[in-house]
Amino acid sequence: MLQPTFDFSNMEPIAEPKWGENGSLEGVIERAEQLSAETKAIADAVTTPGTGSSADSPASTRRNQVEQAVRQLRIQSVVSGSRPLASINRRPYGVDDVVEVSLGLYTQPVKFKILTINKDSVKVRVSEPEHGIRIETIVPVG
């Protein structure tokens, strides 16, 4: 079996951290916070492909995120009875429960309230008045 070989001769040295007074990590921590803020700003400015440009309004962007979250809902199975249950994204839920769908690190999760559970579908609602969003949809089993 061949062993991989690595040539590190052309690599630049890693920059030394800038230490604060008395050898503390204040400088390193401050730089990490700056990078985190810059990364979040970039993530906020970039849109998901197919959702439009970064010039979209926050309400339009959020509506696209909600539509994306609806497509991620998967109903595996339904149990009928006086208190029906549905397996949604591999977790059990009942009527009036809330299903959260996360779309990413810097995006608010979308919260779906379960309105009804039938033998072949589940009706859910997303209500976000701050974005002018109120959507009810039926998600089929399978």
Image (cartoon, rainbow, N blue to C red):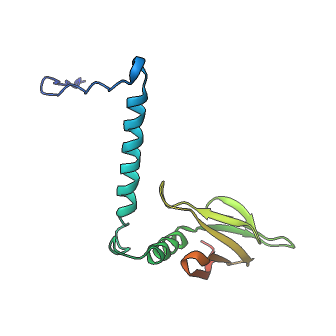
Q: Position of residue 28 (x, y in %)?
A: 38, 30
The residue drawn where x is 73% and y is 77% is 115
Q: Quadrant of the N terminus?
A: top left
* Above/below status of 25 relative to 76: above
Q: Residue at 34% x, 68% y: name it.
A: 49
Which quadrant would residue 10 be assigned to in this image?
top left
Q: Residue at x 32, y 26 (%)?
A: 17
Using the image as rendered, state which of residue 135 and residue 130 is in the foreground: 130
Q: Is residue 42 left or right of residue 66?
A: left
Q: Quadrant of the C terminus?
A: bottom right
Left or right of 75, for residue 45: left
Number of marks in the rendered image: 0
Residue 118 image offset from top left, x and y in percent: 73, 79
The front one of 93 and 20 is 20
Across and down, in percent, residue 58 comes to: 45, 73
In which quadrant of the rendered view does residue 81 lie? Answer: bottom right
Q: Judge from the rendering whether residue 85 lies leftward or rightward of residue 106; answer left or right.
A: right
Task: Answer above or below: position of 63 versus 74.
Answer: below
Residue 54, given in percent of the width and then of the height, sits at 34, 70
Q: Residue lying furthest front in this view?
A: 21
**Picture residue at 38% right of the left edge, 30% below the top:** 27
Q: Give the farthest residue toward the right.
A: 82
Residue 3, compared with residue 79, is above or below; it is above
